[in-house]
Image (tube, rainbow, N blue to C red):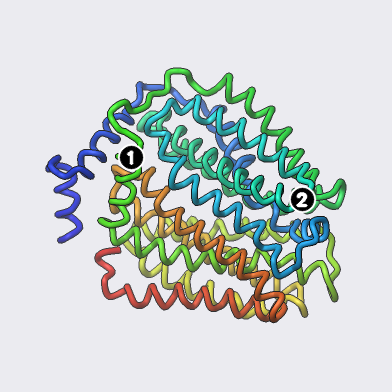
Amino acid sequence: MQKEEIHDTAATAPAMEGTQTYTRLDEASQAPAYKLQPAVMFMFAIACGLSVANVYYAQPLLDAMALDFGISHASVGIVITVSQIGSALALLFVVPLGDMLNRRTLLLTQLTVLVMALIVVGFAPTKGALLPGMVALGLMATAMTQGLIAFAATLASAEQRGRAVGITQSGVVIGLLLARTMAGAMADLAGWRSVYLLSATLLVGMFFFLYRVLPRHSTSSGNITYPQLLRSMFKLFAEEPVLRNRGIITMFMFAAFNTFWTSLVLPLSSAPHFLSHTAIGAFGLLGAVGALGAAKAGKLADRGRGQWASGVALSLLLLSWLPLGFTQYSLWALVAGIILFDMAAQAIHVTNQVMIFKARPDAASRLVGCYMIFYSIGSGAGAFLSTQAYAAGGWQGVSILGASFSAAGLLFWLITLKKSRHF
């Protein structure tokens, strides 16, 4: 088959420049044996959770930010959009640096800049100061999260690597889920700025712990230049149809995802619900139920049923907008819709990653960076268009937009299904 021929060529024919780059990076990543203790794995997970949460704190705070800076509901989604732009820049230009530079030094530097960005956001006097701070926040938070996951995988021995990555990834999920709840509670207690200042304080403490825990003997590649590193990522886009197809699916999925979560605070904080930030943030905890669907989808993908899992999950994603559309009339409909929505979204995300890792296992970290670029594009577009839709048509406008993104993902999957052997 075509895909097998590509893999065989990558493994045996160093004549191609891109293949040489993959080989050098793979060989350079063979770090000395290091026993990664369970306590250190859990601290990596905590650090990941504290880092990634910064990207999501703003979602339940948009109405407070709009009031503070005089931003209209139609335009306040730009706060989320610029942080997603920062995330995209990190995935493309910063995360790959882990294959060139000393990871310990790189992570500690990124953590320092992240704390500075949080302080800028927490004390921002104007929108002109807030938005650059949010870009830097998205940039460093994403770089920290992905860098910690890659570092954990590199430090772990072969027999403990799966566990190390799994534990570290669990921190990402928990941080994402708790971010909205914590942000809402803190905003009610001490205002929205306290969320970012508390996060900065927690990360200062994390800096000193990581300074002591991160090993000093971490290795980096001395045989690859930065332009070559970036060029190898673009070659992945060109050479791997599974990456392109799954990336487009995830772009539509995360556009729908951020369409929902960005604007949810607007109808819940107004009539007839008038919910507090704490209550609004608590709805994010319902996403934990979605982890059940994600685990099942991963098992199906491992068994070669990734296409079937994709079709079911994309259909459920579209179906979930039916109860979500009644949010203004029934909180129970919202609860049911969130459970179905998050279960479908996480199942799609996990299935996509399993399938792209199978395509080029020797380039897993670069595949993640490339794949998550699509995530950032979709998330940014969804956040920006969501508040525009709410201003134009209320919650029904948001529901139509989210359902349209979901339908586009399902339609694209159906179109490419005939070429499933290339997925």
In this rendered view, identify the residue nearer to me: 275 or 89. 89
Q: Earlier in the sequence, mark 1 or mark 2?
A: 2
Residue furthest toward the front?
128
Residue type pointed to by label 1: Pro
> On the picture, is 301 further left or further right than 112?
left
Residue type pointed to by label 2: Thr
**In this rendering, which labeled residue sits more in front, label 1 or label 2?**
2
Can residue 42 be seen in the rendering of this structure?
A: no
What is the number of the mark on residue 332? none
Name the quadrant containing residue 116.
top right
In this rendered view, identify the residue nearer to me: 87 or 45. 87
Label 1 – label 2 distance at C-alpha: 37 Å
| Residue that carries the numbered disc 2 in the rendered image | 126
Number of callouts: 2
> On the picture, is 110 further left or further right than 422?
right
- Asked if 140 appears above or below 349 in the picture, the reply is above
> On the picture, is 305 further left or further right than 119?
left
Residue drawn at x 43%, y 56% is: 298
| Residue that carries the numbered disc 1 in the rendered image | 227
SS state under label 1: helix
Name the quadrant containing residue 153.
top left
